[in-house]
Image (tube, helix red, strand yellow):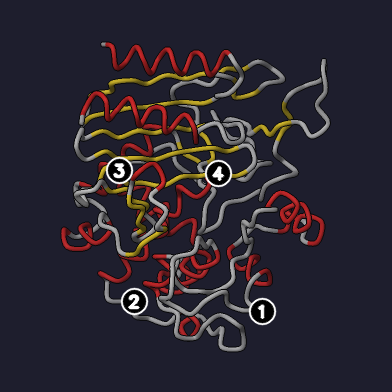
Amino acid sequence: MTFKKNITDLLTAKSDAGDFSGVVLIQRGDEKLLHVAHGYANLAWKILNHLDTRFRIASVSKMFTAVAVLQLIEAGKLTLETKLVSLLGLEKTKIPPEATVQHMLTMTSGMADWFDESGNWEEDWAALCREHPLYLFRQNEDYLPLFTDVNPVSSPGEKHQYNGAGFILLGLAIQKLTGLSYFDAIRSNIFEKAGMGDADFIALEEIAERVAEGYVPASNADEGSARWQRNIYSTTPAAAADGGATCSADDLVRFSQALRAGELLSPAMTTEMLKPHVIQNEDRFRGYDWKYGYGNNFILDDDEQIVRWGHTGEEDGVSCRLYYYPQGDLDVIILGNQSWCAGKLGWEIHDLILEKFK
């Protein structure tokens, strides 16, 4: 009871302070230990977020792309060693020709990203938006001009560096090898198989039931003015293979549970999906080893035991987390519809989980 009360009080305080708007679900098996909604799906009309509200999940949906690629490997249509430049006919680009599917999945390809999140990322993002109108980004192919003629940053396999462009290429491979659009392939092979009934790909301008609007801090906010504005001019309008699906919290628990239960992949491939493959960084943030797998992030303790796996999702007006804690058999989903609201909250919930279940 104390565990639930501590998290409930934490969420209430953050919501009251305007620091969180969204849904949090903590579940073990079929038991929902906590499922709460805070804030507004629509600020103008004061329409509340509800437990079944759907949110964009940004890069959390990289996990869907990774699983779909592993399904193609199991079907014999692809291998981890397949070179994507050759498969996709991109020989006349600057993408390293020796970069493989495995390099893309682990973000070790060394290729340029379509957006490099540098220390001045806000200025860089504003510049990209001026040069490349965001409303034009509707399909995976639309991202190619942003990175195919940019020099690589390292050699394939040299190091992990966060990279969304590699997942764009994986999405193109999914399209080529299934004969479906990326979106239809994920709907059929991930959403339907996992029972994710509310999951879909919904563009910002679409009218869809129970979808929360995204909010960013108002750039011209001053005393007495509105604190938030909609994210319609500051993020890509449609999803792609590197992120942007729309899901409810229940959808993401179903995905995580289906993945662990072997409902999406064979036992052997499930093991590969649920283990780390490369070092993500060596600074041991918060005392953990950070590693990356196939579209999956891991933190490990000093005994090299997995403490948590999953993925984060951040874009303007979107802040999400999908986490699984093996020791407590806990699924933790945080879906937020205002910028950067899930990060610190995720760590605060993390600390309470370890206090309770470690």
Amino acid type indicated by mark 4: Glu
Q: Earlier in the sequence, mark 4 or mark 1?
A: 1
Q: Earlier in the sequence, mark 4 or mark 2?
A: 2
Q: Secondary structure at mark 3?
A: strand
Residue 314 — which label? 4
Residue lying farthest to the bottom in this orientation: 92
Residue 91, compared with residue 118, is above or below; it is below
Please say if the residues under marks 1 and 2 sit with CB atoms less than 8 Å apart: no
Q: Quadrant of the C terminus?
A: top left
**Local crowd at mark 1 within 10 Å, few (<14), some, or many (≥20)?**
few
Q: Quadrant of the N terminus?
A: top left
Q: CA distance from mark 4 to mark 1?
A: 26 Å
**Local crowd at mark 2 within 10 Å, few (<14), some, or many (≥20)?**
many
Give how far across and how far down residue 164 sits, in percent. 53, 61
Q: CA distance from mark 1 to mark 2?
A: 25 Å
Q: Is residue 309 left or right of residue 15?
A: left
Q: Is residue 141 left or right of residue 265?
A: right
Residue position marked by numbered label 3 in the rendering: 308
Which residue shows up at 45% across the image and 85% down it? Answer: 98
Q: Secondary structure at mark 4?
A: strand
Residue position marked by numbered label 1 in the rendering: 149
102 or 357: which is nearer to us?
357
Q: Earlier in the sequence, mark 3 or mark 4?
A: 3
Location of residue 174 by image quarter: bottom left
Please say if the residues under marks 3 and 4 sit with CB atoms less than 8 Å apart: no
Q: Nearer the viewer, mark 4 or mark 2?
A: 4
